[in-house]
Image (cartoon, rainbow, N blue to C red):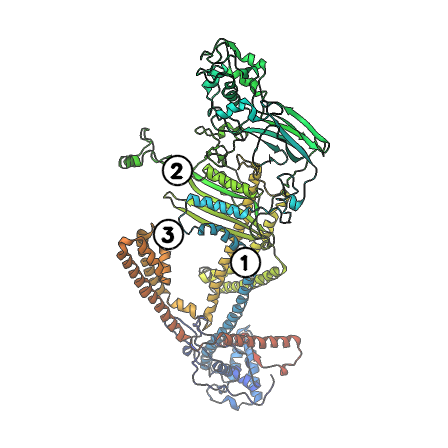
């Protein structure tokens, strides 16, 4: 102890500081506080003051004067810095006399040596342990010799206990300030980590652009009530926005849509010409036109024009490597017209078509039988649907009978008599159609690969089809012929001699059998949905359909029609009977029609035959046309990802249509038109959804976009929009995030250590009941949840990110799924490759898994933030001014509970009334939950527009609506809302009175940091041993003060026995 001349005087009382109150209960339990006692380091100014302060504590207030209770809630009143200085001065630099037993001698008369001896004896007693009863008595006598009587020790024990609670409170306040600072650091670090876990700005840009794209077509309608045509328009607009082909001639070769061109394919202007092409030609040859003559000069064509039976022959060339026809429109066939076209090496197929039909339109089966002497019962039936087939047997008969034979009969005779024994068409083999030449042309000349004549039947086949005797009609036109021909036998021979398509191989730049690369690039083009966000593989349109059943069962079947059914039939009669309703089960049968076979459709294509793409089971028995839409049912597993999230569509019958990214813009629009013409949306539709995945390469962001249209039985169609994203960068963790996580983990460990010490202390004092008391306290459970959940959420994000990144392996499968078999198909446009479709659905599910895991992570983080917020308010409770909010709600909790009950009853009652009155026309009142939320919003916003809408939907009951509106506003806003505010104001005023003189947060931290700085300085000096004890500052920390007081109390307790 360093010696100074005189102790410092005690701080002056400014007269307005309240005494220290409510330090704690007699058992040492600390109460909640409205304000902390300042924790300043206290120093001794002289050895004399230290000695006297260590022995004499008479100036301290009694325990009873240190207690206060306000409204049943024990709180600490503010103890100012000056007041706390006086407390410390009484402890370490007391200016009161040291009582010497009953002599009444004053301690100030003692010299320094006397006080030093007394101090040494006192500290010896404080720091010694009682090993034997003899030692106890000895120390007791030593203490009594110094004038400390038993009654004086008892009085000092009471005072020391009160002082001990003050010191404990200061220690607790300091610890609270430190924990609050650390917890603030935890909140800051966790919030910083959250901002690093997801690039919100990039996600916002991606999601907003996609949301605007999806919403704009519907919002442009200007009506919330949708129709089927609006959905088709939505499909058309989205497809038009995504599928935009580059302009040929802009100087840029946009691969792969543009490529080196030849003929009508590719773009020669931007990408140059395709090399290694051969010039092929097709030249028709009309068998009825002699050399050096024209069709107009031929009598047979005069007859055809007279009867409007002129055939419309056309041709086209199908290229095997392009998988499509050379010309977008079939080329009319004219005699000896030379048509030249450039093709690369490969197979070409020249096909001829006949656009008009004579059989059934101009010539019937009876007239054909009469003009050709064919058995009428063997005549083929008229085709079920119009097609452009060339070389059909029925057309050959129609031309031979209706045109060719008519040329040789007497038109002036009503009986169509002739001098011929049989039809000259039979003698010539029933010629029909066109002959042609196919070959290649070059500088060296023309190389004819094949020359074919017109179709006809050999005389052997005709003779084999003849049978003796006249036909049933009596061979009216050719009565001299005593034979009748079987049309079925003629048809067999005709099928072998007349083909519509002929295939040729052109190999000018390659060898036969050599594999040839694709002419058109097979890569999927980049289809930007919005700038930077490119389509993944295809747009998916899926529909859920309900089975259609009779609205009533058959009453003739026993047990099939219940009492309710019979009552409906009796009351509703024809309005109910025979109507079909949707069942709960999903439909599993094909429906609709392929518009390529629908003659009234602009997509009708007579060049194709249904047998090429459809089986007999896929053709409607009612219409005879192929179905347009088929269900697909897949067993979709969740084993492709680390997280076994089940696929909800697995095993369900769903009608899926794909608009492949490889489609050109016109083909994509034709696919949408196929939906419209084929009748994709019907009364059985439960919901239809448009989905598409996008990827932003610049931001490495995936997005899955979905618009769902729900069809209600009442006719309402609702649209729901959903855009969800996740970034690849969100799956990766950098050094900054790892450092931040380590910091958060250390803070959580510190919090756990604090909680663990609290649990251990409670268990030591109360045993298992203490542990039970700790675990049943909600605030303690909140602490534990924060400690565990915060670091685990970050670990979950890091681990799932690493695992998901491993699962996302699209490169191993090569290109993206190519769902459609042929994206340029003209029939069965939506035919898919099952393996590729399954791969697409698995990729889609993988993206959904990523999004789901990301949503779980964000939800977990959100819950953690809420828990941290709750714990933050809990930790502020100790601070006099910052804890006003929690104590206000705590004091008003009972009143708030009663108010909430009354307010809830009002909302429920008016919610029921609002749903009943306005729920049929206002979506805000459709359900009970929506109705209640609408009323709560009205309470806070006073929405006058809502009132106008209510009056608009109930014009005949506007007075009732007005009463409903005014009474609700009066009860909820004028009365209840103001009562709630009054409750809070009253609670706040009570709490505010107790915290009037509480220290501020800055004062509390200033004193805590000052104390900790002095304590750290003292420890460093002791550790370094750089200074002697006489050179050290006279500083006693709160912890050391508590130890000395414990020792002194222990000594007095043992002394008094």
Give the labeled residue for mark 1: 200
- Between discs 3 and 2, the one toward the N terminus: 2
The crowd level at tag 3 (other Cα within 10 Å; few <14, some 14-19, many 20+) is few
Q: CA distance from mark 1 to mark 3?
A: 32 Å
Task: Find numbered disc 3 in the image and state the secondary structure of the residue it sits on.
Answer: helix
Residue 72, given in percent of the width and then of the height, sits at 37, 71
- Marks 3,2: beta carbons within 8 A: no
Residue 693 at x, y percent in the picture: 54, 47
Seen from the viewer's position, the closer of residues 822 and 71 is 822
- The answer to whether any part of residue 198 appears in the image is no
Q: Residue at x 32, y 55 (%)?
A: 950
Secondary structure at badge 1 equals: helix
Residue 27, image quadrant: bottom left
Residue at screen point 52% across, 60% down: 787
| Quadrant of the drawing holding the N terminus | bottom right
Between circles 1 and 3, the one closer to the viewer is 3
Between the residue at mark 3 and the residue at mark 2, the CA separation in whole angstroms equals 26 Å
The mark found on residue 583 in the picture is 2
In the image shown, does 855 or 85 lie closer to the viewer? Answer: 855
Above or below — where is 426 with respect to 891? above
Q: Say which element carries label 2.
A: strand
Residue 447 in percent (x, y) is at 70, 28
Q: Residues within 10 Å of mark 1 (few under 14, many from 20)?
A: few
Q: Which residue in the protein does label 3 denote? A: 923
Foreground label between 3 and 2: 3
**Distance between the alpha carbons at the discs numbered 1 and 2:** 44 Å
Q: Is residue 281 above or below residue 1027?
A: above
At x 34% / y 56%, what residue is drawn? Answer: 949
């Amino acid at each position: 102890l360093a010696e100074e001349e005189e102790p410092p005087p005690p701080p002056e009382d400014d007269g307005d500081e309240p005494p220290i109150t409510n330090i704690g209960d007699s058992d040492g339990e600390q109460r909640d506080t409205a304000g902390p006692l300042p924790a300043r380091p206290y120093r001794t100014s002289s050895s004399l003051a230290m000695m006297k302060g260590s022995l004499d504590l008479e100036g301290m207030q009694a325990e009873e004067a240190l207690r206060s209770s306000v409204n049943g809630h024990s709180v600490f009143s503010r103890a100012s810095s000056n007041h706390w200085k006086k407390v410390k001065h009484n402890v370490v630099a007391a200016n009161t006399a040291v009582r010497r037993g009953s002599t009444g001698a004053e301690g100030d008369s003692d010299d320094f040596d006397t006080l030093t001896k007394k101090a040494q004896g006192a500290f010896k007693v404080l720091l010694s342990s009682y090993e034997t009863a003899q030692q106890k008595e000895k120390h007791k006598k030593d203490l009594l010799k110094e004038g400390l009587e038993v009654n004086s020790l008892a009085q000092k024990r009471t005072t020391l206990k009160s002082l001990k609670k003050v010191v404990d409170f200061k220690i607790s306040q300091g610890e609270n300030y430190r924990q609050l600072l650390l917890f603030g650091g935890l909140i800051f670090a966790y919030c910083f980590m959250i901002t690093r876990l997801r690039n919100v700005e990039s996600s916002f840009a991606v999601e907003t652009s996609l949301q605007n794209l999806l919403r704009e077509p519907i919002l442009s309608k200007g009506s919330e009530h949708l129709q089927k045509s609006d959905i088709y328009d939505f499909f058309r607009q989205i497809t038009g926005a995504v599928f935009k082909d580059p302009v040929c001639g802009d100087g840029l070769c946009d691969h792969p849509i543009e490529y080196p061109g030849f003929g009508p394919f590719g773009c020669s202007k931007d990408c140059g010409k395709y090399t290694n092409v051969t010039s092929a030609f097709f030249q028709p040859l009309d068998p009825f036109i002699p050399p050096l003559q024209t069709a107009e000069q031929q009598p047979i064509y005069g007859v055809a024009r007279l009867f409007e039976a002129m055939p419309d022959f056309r041709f086209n060339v199908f290229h095997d490597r392009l998988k499509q026809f050379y010309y977008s429109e079939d080329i009319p066939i004219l005699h000896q017209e030379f048509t030249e076209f450039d093709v690369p090496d490969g197979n070409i197929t020249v096909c001829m078509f006949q656009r008009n039909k004579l059989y059934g339109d101009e010539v019937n089966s009876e007239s054909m039988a009469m003009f050709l002497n064919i058995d009428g019962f063997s005549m083929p039936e008229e085709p079920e649907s119009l097609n452009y087939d060339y070389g059909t047997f029925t057309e050959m008969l129609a031309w031979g009978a209706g045109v060719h034979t008519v040329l040789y009969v007497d038109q002036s005779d009503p009986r169509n008599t002739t001098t011929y024994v049989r039809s000259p068409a039979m003698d010539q083999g029933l010629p029909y159609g066109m002959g042609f030449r196919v070959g290649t042309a070059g500088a060296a000349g023309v190389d004819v690969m094949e020359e074919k004549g017109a179709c006809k039947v050999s005389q052997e086949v005709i003779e084999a089809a003849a049978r003796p005797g006249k036909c049933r009609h009596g061979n009216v036109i050719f009565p001299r012929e005593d034979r009748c021909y079987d049309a079925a036998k003629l048809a067999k021979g005709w099928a072998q001699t007349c083909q519509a398509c002929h295939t040729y191989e052109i190999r000018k730049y390659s060898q036969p059998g050599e594999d040839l690369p694709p002419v058109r690039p097979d890569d999927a083009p980049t289809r930007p949905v919005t700038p930077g966000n490119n389509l993944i593989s295809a747009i998916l349109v899926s529909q859920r359909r309900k089975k259609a059943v009779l609205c009533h069962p058959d009453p003739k079947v026993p047990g099939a029609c219940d009492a309710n059914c019979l009552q409906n039939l009796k009351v509703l009669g024809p309005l109910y009977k025979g109507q079909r309703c949707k069942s709960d089960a999903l439909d599993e049968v094909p429906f609709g029609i392929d518009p390529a076979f629908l003659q009234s459709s602009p997509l009708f294509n007579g060049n194709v035959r249904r047998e090429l793409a459809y089986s007999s089971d896929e053709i409607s028995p009612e219409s005879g046309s192929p179905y347009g839409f088929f269900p697909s049912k897949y067993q979709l597993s969740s084993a492709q990802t680390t997280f076994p999230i089940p696929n909800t569509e697995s095993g369900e019958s769903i009608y899926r249509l794909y608009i492949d990214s490889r489609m050109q813009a016109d083909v994509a629009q034709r696919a949408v038109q196929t939906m419209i013409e084929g009748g994709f949306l019907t009364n059985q539709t439960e919901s239809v959804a448009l989905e598409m995945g996008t990827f932003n390469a610049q931001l490495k962001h995936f997005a899955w976009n979905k618009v769902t249209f729900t069809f209600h039985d009442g006719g309402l169609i609702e649209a729901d929009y959903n855009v969800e994203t996740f970034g690849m960068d969100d799956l990766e963790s950098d050094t900054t995030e790892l450092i931040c996580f380590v910091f958060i983990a250390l803070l959580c460990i510190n919090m756990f250590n604090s909680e663990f010490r609290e649990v251990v202390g409670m268990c030591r004092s109360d045993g298992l009941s203490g542990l039970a008391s700790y675990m049943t306290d909600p605030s303690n459970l909140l602490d534990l949840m924060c400690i565990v959940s915060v670091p685990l959420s970050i670990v979950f994000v890091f681990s799932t990110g690493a695992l998901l990144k491993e699962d996302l392996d699209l490169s191993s499968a090569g290109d993206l799924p190519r769902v459609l078999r042929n994206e340029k198909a003209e029939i069965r446009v939506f035919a898919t490759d099952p393996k590729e479709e399954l791969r697409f659905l698995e990729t889609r599910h993988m993206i959904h898994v990523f999004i789901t895991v990301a949503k779980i992570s964000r939800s977990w983080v959100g819950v953690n933030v809420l828990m941290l917020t709750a714990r933050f308010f809990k930790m502020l409770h100790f601070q006099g001014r910052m804890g006003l909010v929690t104590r206000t709600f705590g004091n008003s909790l009972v009143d708030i509970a009663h108010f909430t009950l009354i307010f809830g009853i009002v909302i429920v009652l008016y919610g029921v009334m609002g749903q009943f009155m306005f729920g049929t026309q206002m979506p805000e009142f459709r359900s009970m939950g929506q109705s209640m939320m609408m009323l709560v919003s009205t309470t806070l916003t006073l929405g006058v527009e809502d009132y106008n809408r209510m009056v608009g939907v109930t014009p005949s009951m506007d007075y009732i609506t007005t009463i409903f509106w005014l009474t609700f506003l009066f009860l909820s806003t004028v009365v209840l809302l103001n009562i709630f505010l009054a409750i809070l104001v009253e609670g706040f005023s009570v709490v505010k009175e107790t915290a009037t003189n509480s220290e501020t947060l800055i004062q509390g931290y200033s004193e805590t940091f000052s104390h900790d700085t002095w304590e750290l300085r003292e420890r460093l000096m002791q550790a370094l041993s750089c200074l002697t004890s006489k050179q050290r500052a006279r500083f006693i920390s709160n912890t050391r003060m508590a130890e000395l007081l414990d020792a002194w109390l222990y000594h007095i307790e043992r002394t008094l026995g």
